[in-house]
Amino acid sequence: MSNKKAALELGTKPVGALLVQYAMPAIIAMVASSLYNMIDSIFIGQGVGPMAISGLAVTFPFMNLSAAFGAAIGIGSSTFLSVKLGQRDYEIANRILGNNVMLNIVVGIIFGGLCLLFLDPILRFFGASDQTLPYAREYMVIILLGNAFTHLYFGLNAVLRSAGKPKFAMYTTVFTVVLNAILDPIFIYALNLGIAGAAYATVLSQFTALCWQWYLFSKKEELLHFEYDKFRIEAPIVRNIVSIGISPFCMNACGCLVVLFINNSLLLYGDDITVGAYGISNRVAFVFVMVTLGVCQGMQPIAGYNYGAQNYNRMLEVLKLASISGTAVCAVGFFIAMFLPRQCMRLFTTDPTMIEQGIVALRYNMMFFLIIGAQMVITNFFQSIGKAKISIFLSLSRQLLILIPMIYIFPKFWGLEGVWISLPASDAIAAIMAYVMLWVYVRQIKVNA
């Protein structure tokens, strides 16, 4: 299908069919990505033990921080690249691709090297104890040694989506997940490498996918391809990438900060098992969050196009359908957390203490999932129609303005339960804020129509 025809159908084709068409590849890729994170946790929990899974939980904010830098480069360069492709400026587009590669290599090596130098203090800062530090360190040393490969893998996948090859990006993600699932039991059990085996499986699966991506971009007949003389960092291009990528960087970095506060509070008012239990609950919740984000990705081009065309009825229709879909997805997560929490925990561990604490963590963490699906859609809706400040405010306010103060204050009154209560309480307030801001915006549209 030509780019022109694809754009036109955003304003003419039935909205429901469009949402399915655009959301399904994103949902598949998101589910694969979330399963990728779960697989390591399941094999480590079942094959190494509860302290290992608690050590893995400590690395979550570390991984989020690395992802923040990756998102800044990947989203920044792919968005800038999309604009240049739309303008048919293929020379600049290929230079952006070259800058994407070089930035990911440089940032990946510098970030990995610096973190390796100060690994133990960083892990302590993120909530590692004497018991969990050896596991967290063993895992992160290998991950950080392969950090440049990881950054390149995610960066080139973002470019694949922007270059009109979303299915190839999806295939790459699914391939990485499947390979990781195959390698995990081999390295953890057969080769008896423990938690290090999971790290080796992660890096090797990403490196293998990276080799395939490299092959795809090496084809000279492709419009967007590697030109090795353009593999250099150019200040004007980097400035554009950073200006676009600063928003996703802040959101990911903020997520890192929040998990850091939660882990340290859980360690202060609970113990290492409590940290691990929260880590598992986060993995389960992450699956439903990622599916909802896939719906949001499908909604974004439809809402953005019809907003630009001032076709507000179609814009609001896709928002309504996406909100219903997001609510339905998160409702499934809510019912699983409320009625099947023990079965979820047993996927990850056989330790009875961690199972019991995990049930509590899962129920609190997903208590208000029935209203969170629509809240995520609304936040992404504002971003898709160019109102980035509202979107960033809704995203960061939940974490910085609501959740972190609650994590600090509530445990002083209710101890460990106060930490758990802060999670659904911040979700509820964030959802109400999103609903109110959407109501105000829709009223403005109807007044000005």
Image (cartoon, grey):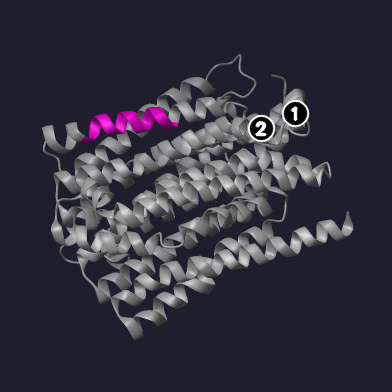
Name the residue at 56% across, 44% down. 325
Magenta residues (range)? 173-184
Q: Along the horizontal axis of the image, is 424 left or right of 22?
A: left
Question: Residue 116: where, in percent of width, then height?
Answer: 30, 53
Q: Amino acid at mark 1?
A: Glu
Q: Amino acid at mark 2?
A: Leu
Q: Quadrant of residue 147?
A: top left
Label number found at residue 9: 1
Label number found at residue 127: none
Q: CB atoms at circles 2 and 1 under 8 Å apart?
A: yes
Q: Let me know if residue 101 appears in the view.
A: no
Q: Rate crowding at label 2 as few (under 14), some (14 to 19) or many (20 or more) other CA atoms within 10 Å.
A: some
Residue matched to label 2: 18
Q: Pick out the residue farthest to the bottom.
A: 413
For the stretch drawn in magenta, what is the main secondary structure?
A: helix
Question: Residue 96: where, in percent of width, then height?
Answer: 62, 36
Q: Quadrant of residue 83?
A: top right
Mark closest to the chain's N terminus, 2 or 1: 1
Quadrant in which the C terminus appears? bottom right
Q: Rate crowding at label 1 as few (under 14), some (14 to 19) or many (20 or more) other CA atoms within 10 Å.
A: some
Between residue 128 and residue 352, name the one nearer to us.
352
